[in-house]
Image (cartoon, helix red, strand yellow):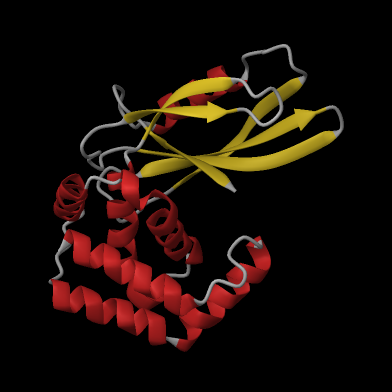
Amino acid sequence: MDIDFYLGRMTLEKEKVIAMVSEIAAFDCGDGVSFEVVGSTPIRDDDDYGGFQVTLIGRLDNVRFRFGIDIATGDPIIPCERDYNYECLVTKESLSIKSYSLESVVAEKLQTVLSKGVANSRSKDYYDLYVIFFTQKDKVNFDSLALAFKKTCEYRRFSMTKPEALMMIDAIGNNSQTNKRWASYGKTVGYAQGIPFGEVIKAIKEWVNFVL
């Protein structure tokens, strides 16, 4: 639905961000696909560094697709960004891109889940923590994960003890609205359908045990 970018080596100013994205979008790869920047809105209003979502329309012949890219900065990446090889769906070409570390992905999503509690309407946060636990856990350095969580909480000025965190996760798991949203999410996206929310909660509690 959107693409997340971390901005480095330049200031996060709206005019500069839009100009940068517009310049990249205007590049012609010769594949018949074109992109147009059509708007921008602020994101992460509760963050001192803030950020922007830039909305684009992609075109291929008569096909039009509207999507957004979220551009932000500030959050620490622990231990550092990593090189990730992305395989193109059609050509199978491998593209090397810079990516967040798994440790920072888990740390940021876990902090978000704990800070928003039952008010969190993004079921995808729960799904991501679940699927990373069951498919990528063996690639996670747990010392780096604990440090990433600590640094993320410090940056976001958030604090919670382990008993408090586990109680919060239980509250999320037992909340009727959260369960309804999870069931609706599974029907909407398909790939989460049939996953019991109780199993998701167990996975998130395991992440808590690793970081606190």
Residue 105 appears in the picture as rendered = no
**Residue 133 spot, x, y in % from top left:** 38, 58
**Residue 31 spot, x, y in % from top left:** 74, 16
* Left or right side of 157 for 44: right
The residue lying toward the viewer, choosing from 18 and 167, is 167
Q: Quick one: which residue is furthest to the right in this view? A: 62
In the picture, the quarter occupied by the C terminus is bottom left
Whether residue 74 is situated above or below residue 23 in the rendered picture: below
The residue lying toward the viewer, choosing from 141 and 152, is 141
Q: Quick one: which residue is furthest to the front in this view? A: 138
Q: Residue at x 78, y 19 (%)?
A: 32
Q: Residue at x 54, y 17 (%)?
A: 23
Q: Residue at x 15, y 69 (%)?
A: 160
Residue 5 appears in the picture as rendered = yes
Whether residue 69 is situated above or below residue 195 in the rendered picture: above
Tally the numbered discs: 0
* Left or right side of 67 for 178: left
Quadrant of the rendered image containing residue 79: top left
The residue lying toward the viewer, choosing from 136 and 45, is 136
Whether residue 163 is situated above or below residue 9 in the rendered picture: below
The residue lying toward the viewer, choosing from 160 and 12, is 160
* Left or right side of 91 for 153: left
* Left or right side of 123 for 163: left
Q: Residue at x 52, y 25 (%)?
A: 21
